[in-house]
Image (spheres, coloured by chain):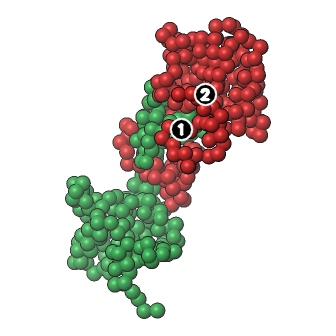
Chain colours: A green, B red
Amino acid sequence: MNHYPEAVVKLILHLCRLPGIGEKTAERFAMYLLTAPEQEVAALGKSIAELQKKVKICNTCFCLSDSETCRICRDSARDHSLVCIVESPADMAAIEKSGAYPGVYHVLQGLVSPMDGIGPDEIRIRELVKRVASGTVKEVVIATSTSVEGEATADYISKSLKPYSVKITRIASGVPMGGELKYIDQVTLKKAMEARRVL
Amino acid sequence: MNHYPEAVVKLILHLCRLPGIGEKTAERFAMYLLTAPEQEVAALGKSIAELQKKVKICNTCFCLSDSETCRICRDSARDHSLVCIVESPADMAAIEKSGAYPGVYHVLQGLVSPMDGIGPDEIRIRELVKRVASGTVKEVVIATSTSVEGEATADYISKSLKPYSVKITRIASGVPMGGELKYIDQVTLKKAMEARRVL
């Protein structure tokens, strides 16, 4: 890497920090950026540098937003009594893409993970309890991942919301669509069997 | 993607231009950059924006450089009568990493490729001929890729340099080290057989 000019070496080192990017790919990006149209490169640099200043966090659901309150929280056509709890803005975007959800969201910005020193107070659970306590919410759908941390967080939230008269649901676990049974792990199959439904 | 704020969408679109990066990976980069330390993100943005301004092209070998003449061309310990011809700065870096080359370079900045409308005048062949004509070069090693374009370019260079009293060599083709014979393609095997040497 020290066969390149200093500016290129510096860029490669910065690009290496991106998730899943090693030195080889970073080098490839740098070579591309060196020969790409000047305007395009400047625009990319600017949009990275400005990103954190321009993006706000919604004061209601804590998702990424252009303004104080996000587009979804401002939308009167959405069902504000139905709140879906997700770990991150990316999870929220995934559910939005499915087009199957008419309610609003609550983005935890993390999962309870004692191993990483993240307790319930480090994520937005307190704000969720306050939101439910205000009485406007009729159902919360817990849509955290089905990982150990996701399940633990779902458990914790479910216990925290018990005192309130709110329906608490969890997204279904089971065989993914298009999945071949023989390749599905045993825990998923067990869950799918337990949650079988009458046709 | 339109479930994200405008600044995020813009960044994702810019990142999608990077080679081999699709919308999913760009989204992952954007999510990382949103939560990464502010200083790190600013540094990345700055080094991208400044890249093309800071990096110069060496006036002798046309590789990337910090100054008018590159570190290798200025190095009196290198053999300036031996010139290795490569397609790109990345190829040059690969040869430098091998540590097996004591001479200097000539970076073509492309290969002859009639299909893409790139003729010999679009790449730095004229400058190479001039350099050889000056009389200081004793040997040129043509180290373009062994692709169709690389071979065609090597042929063209070899013909262009014929009138001058310079030794013209081509890097060896053959079975790569650690390669299993049964998985090597037939053309490579044929070349390796033709170029067999006495032990």
The subunit carrying tag 2 is B
Circle 1: residue type = Pro
Q: Nearer the viewer, residue B159 or B133?
A: B159
**Tag 1 near tag 2, CB within 8 Å:** no
Against A127, residue B80 (above or below) is above
**Looking at this view, is A37 or A146 the one in front?**
A146
Count neighbours of disc 1 (C-alpha within 10 A) and say few if under 14, some if 14 to 19, many if 20 or more. few
Position of B13 relative to A135 (above/below): above
- Residue behind mark 1: B176
Query: Which image quadrant is residue B145 in?
Result: top right
**Residue ID for mark 2:** B171
Whole-percent x, y for residue A146 in the image: 35, 69
Please name the residue shown 51% across and 46% down the image: B180
Estimate the x, y position of residue B117 in percent, counting from the top left.
77, 36
Q: Earlier in the sequence, mark 1 or mark 2?
A: 2
Q: Do labels 1 and 2 share a chain?
A: yes
Q: Residue at 44% across / 72% down in the picture?
A: A183
Q: In this view, does A43 lie above or below B105?
A: below
Q: Is residue A184 visible?
A: yes
